[in-house]
Image: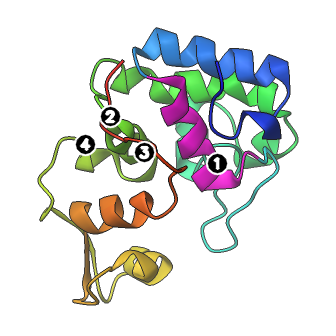
Amino acid sequence: MKLPYDHLIGPQLLAAIIDLAQWLGIRPEWLLIVMHKESSLNPKAINKHSGASGLIQFMPGTAKGLGTTVEAIRVMTGLQQMDWVRKYYAPYRGRMHNLFDTYFAVFYPAAIGKPVDFVLFAKGCKAYAWNKALDMNHNGVVTVGDVKAWLMNYLPDDFDPCDCH
């Protein structure tokens, strides 16, 4: 099976991503797309603003809550990070029904299943400043709809984000 971005990673990491997707009940394409968007599938990726690190850009507080640190994640291989990715995604198992839910589980979990006008960030807060490029209509707020529209710009050709397995 040909998956988006599979040429960027080794067969062991790909197999671990497929295994995790099956366990979560989602399509492996969704995980690959999320990881590509968050880190370009680079396990050493670090966000210069937040310090988020790794394949799914673990925030420092999130890493600590999972029982690790971003410093530890930064020295792990992608395959080693998959145990932490599984642990992170476990609470969302059964709640992700499309690519957007899978992305929101990482980017802003409270947005899973919310309507397009649900506001994530408003002008004036640090999160808005870090994510102002997502304010697609430049109205001072980033909504679920804005993030969905933004993410659509980065999908592989002919990919349907809502297609179910």
For marks 3 and 1 on the same chain, the one whose residue lies earlier in the sequence? 1
Q: Amino acid at mark 3?
A: Tyr
* Crowd rating for badge 2 (residues with CA inside 10 Å; few <14, some 14–19, many 20+): some
The residue that disc 2 covers is 98
Tell whether position 38 is magenta.
yes
Instruction: Evaluate if marks 2 and 1 touch, with contact meaning CB atoms under 8 Å apart.
Output: no
Return the mark for residue 112: 4
User: Tag 3's secondary structure?
Assistant: helix
Q: In the rendering, at what x and y percent does residue 146 appear?
A: 28, 69
Quarter where residue 121 is shown = bottom left
* Crowd rating for badge 1 (residues with CA inside 10 Å; few <14, some 14–19, many 20+): many
The residue that disc 1 covers is 36
Instruction: Evaluate if marks 3 and 1 touch, with contact meaning CB atoms under 8 Å apart.
Output: no
- Magenta range is 27-41
What residue is shown at x 54% (from left), y 24% (from top)? 28
Instruction: Evaluate if marks 1 and 4 touch, with contact meaning CB atoms under 8 Å apart.
Output: no
Residue 126 visible in the current orientation: no
The residue that disc 3 covers is 103
Labels 4, 2: front one: 2
